[in-house]
Image (spheres, helix red, strand yellow):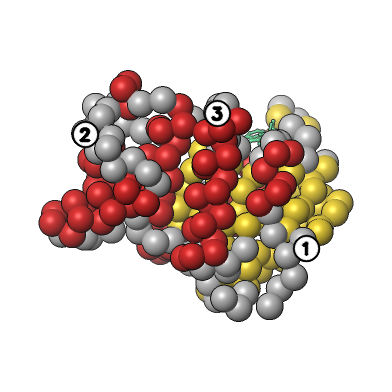
Amino acid sequence: MSEKLAIDAKGLSKGYKIGKTKQQVLKDVDFNAYHGQVTMVMGPSGSGKSTLIAALSGLMKPDEGEVIALGESLWKKKKSKIDQFRLDHCGFIFQGFNLFPALNATQQVEQVLKYCKASKTEARRRAIAALEEVGLGHRLKQTPAALSGGEKQRVAIARALSKNPQLLFADEPTSALDSVSGQVVIKLLHRAAKEHGAAVICVTHDPRLEAYADRIIHMEDGKILDDRQITPLT
Ligand SMILES: Nc1ncnc2c1ncn2[C@@H]1O[C@H](COP(=O)(O)OP(=O)(O)OP(=O)(O)O)[C@@H](O)[C@H]1O
């Protein structure tokens, strides 16, 4: 698959006010990511990785800078259009899984698809297909309490992948998992890039995931210090 630019961000700056002082968390950051690639963002705690993801995905407006996502200037849109953009094109996977305790695995995925205006039958069909794709075809009716950490994260991945997002954001997706489950999760993210052409942007502290990265970006103190393309762009 030939790689196309999915996100192109320029001059991103963001500061948080704490009392009378302002802490600058992103300092004039340029960032881009390609379809079909896993881009890992690494760096010490507090270096601004999650803030960067939030600015790239329409969750938090930067003070300065521009994000072109799938060819559109994200922060020039009205809030309702940004929310719609996220719903239509972005998948999110977080460390804490963010599953609803009362819903079974199929319902977790169906619920998101219904927001995306899929019919009931269509949502059911796609939810089951997504859960089968992450190897949970035998856990369709389990609620989170009956699932292991790795299985919960796979439900969260199925939920994110079910709408076939072009942009997939993962923030520390393996940090609550043992190494075997962590491998399964990163392989699924890798597959989302290679088989579905998603641009996968994964924040992680976990050096074991580096083997699955097409590109590794290192952040420190609100800046990108290093940007290594590992798999050549085609
Ligand atoms: N909403 C907020 N209000 C004030 N300060 C914030 C807010 N969000 C983040 N920060 C601060 O901004 C800095 C960068 O946070 P961020 O979460 O982006 O870093 P990170 O690199 O993702 O860290 P970690 O690896 O620990 O998750 C931190 O010092 C954090 O305390």
Which quarter of the figure is the N terminus placed in?
bottom right
Label 1 near label 2: C-beta < 8 Å?
no
Q: Vertically, is 103 above or below 131?
A: above
Q: Which mark is residue 141?
A: 2
Q: Amino acid at mark 2?
A: Lys
Q: Position of residue 179 (x, y in %)?
A: 60, 30
Which residue is pictured at 69% across the width and 65% down the height? 32
Calculate the distance from the C-alpha at mark 2 to the C-alpha at mark 1: 41 Å
Residue extending farthest to the right is 225
Q: Relative to residue 3, is residue 95 drawn left or right?
A: left
Q: Quadrant of residue 120?
A: bottom left
The residue carrying pointer 2 sits among few (fewer than 14), some (14 to 19) or many (20 or more) residues within 10 Å by Cα, namely: few
Q: Percent from the top left, x then y, of residue 16?
A: 69, 38
Question: At x 70% / y 49%, what residue is drawn?
Answer: 211
Reading the image, the residue beneath label 3 is: 177
Is residue 184 something one can see in this rendering? yes
Q: Amino acid at mark 1?
A: Gln
Q: Quarter of the image for the C terminus: give it.
A: bottom right
| Distance (Cα) linking label 3 and label 2 | 22 Å
Q: Nearer the viewer, residue 172 or 149?
A: 149
Query: Which amino acid type corresponds to the residue marked 3 in the rendered image?
Result: Leu
Q: Could you tell me how far apart the alpha carbons at marks 3 and 1 are, in whole angstroms?
A: 27 Å
Looking at the rendered structure, which numbered label has been put on residue 229? 1
Left or right placement of residue 126 versus residue 17 in this view: left
Is residue 184 shown left or right of residue 3?
A: left
Judging from the image, what secondary structure is the residue with disc 3 in?
A: loop
In the image, residue 106 above or below residue 144 = below
| Earlier residue among tags 3 and 2 | 2
Q: Earlier in the sequence, mark 3 or mark 1?
A: 3
The mark that comes first in sequence, 2 or 1, is 2
Residue positioned 46% across, 32% down in the render: 150
